[in-house]
Amino acid sequence: MPTLVRIKNWDRYQHYKDRNPPWFKMYTDLLTSNTWICSDDASRALAIALMVLASKTQNKIPASEEYLKRVAYLNATPNLQRLVELDFIELVEDSSDASAVLARRYQVASTEKRREEKSREEKTNGRAFALPEWVPVDNWEAWLEVRKKLKVPNTPRSLLLAVKSLDKLRSAGNDPAAVLDQSTERGWRGLFELKKPVDSRGQTVAEPPSIVCQDCGKRTYTWTGHRCDPCWKTYMNPKRERHVAANV
């Protein structure tokens, strides 16, 4: 005598990610399926109740009509035969054969899932990322370290999009190294246009001109004329000492 109810093609609704999952898949084409169209309201409610029970029992539902009535809160005794005729469920004996069939279905579903994950991984690895020559390597790697600390995955696709964004900013006049340093300093996961400095009134401050220091030869941005800030302080220090001594 049959003792278990099983929903046919249950793998379509539940991929056995958990042994007692809190959810299952329900597709919109259920409303146009033969089970739904050819059933009365009681059979439709029973079908949904059986899907919920299947997710909790690994698709091994007791075939007791009284049990189904109570656990599914049905007003009348459920009629399983109608859903059997519509090929939505099947009645099986609670034997090792039924468990073996269930185990084989689980094994097939797990194998297919592993194959899909491996296929996606191979496709991703196939699109190896190559850093363009115009991107400063040190600044780029420093920014990637920030992304790692933020737990942002540095996938080939995301890095490719980042390079495209950096290229657009470069075309707009932003220095790539400065853009990367800005995101690194501020802990940003993305790349953005360089922020211009503002004064205490919120007005944009003009940027200092670019010069080559006449003492050390380093290019820098400064208002101090022809020397960088460190060389300017060194140049001015003797005068300050003499000025202090003269006042004494």
Image: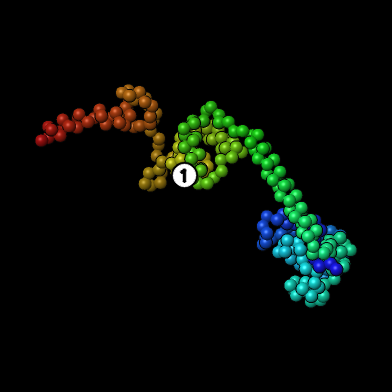
Q: Is the residue 243 above or below the residue 154 in the image?
A: above
Residue 234 in view of the camera:
yes
Colour scheme used in the picture?
Answer: rainbow
Viewed as shown, does residue 25 lie left or right of 40?
left
Q: Tag 1: Cα neighbours inside 10 Å, few (<14), some, or many (≥20)? A: some
Quadrant position of the C terminus in the picture: top left
* Secondary element type, mark 1: loop
**Along the line of sight, the residue nearer the viewer: 135 or 96:** 96
Q: What percent of the width, then of the height, locates residue 71?
A: 74, 72
Viewed as shown, does residue 65 lie left or right of 116?
right
Quadrant for residue 3, please give it: bottom right
Residue name at image x 32 percent, y 27 percent:
227
- Name the kind of residue labelled 1 in the image: Gly
Quadrant position of the N terminus in the picture: bottom right
Q: What percent of the width, then of the height, locates residue 175?
A: 48, 32
Viewed as shown, does residue 59 lie left or right of 184?
right
Q: What percent of the width, then of the height, locates residue 85?
A: 89, 63
Residue name at image x 56 percent, y 40 percent:
154
Viewed as shown, does residue 84 lie left or right of 155?
right
**Along the line of sight, the residue nearer the viewer: 135 or 237:** 135
Q: Check disc 1 and report the residue beneath it.
A: 187
Residue 47 in view of the camera:
no
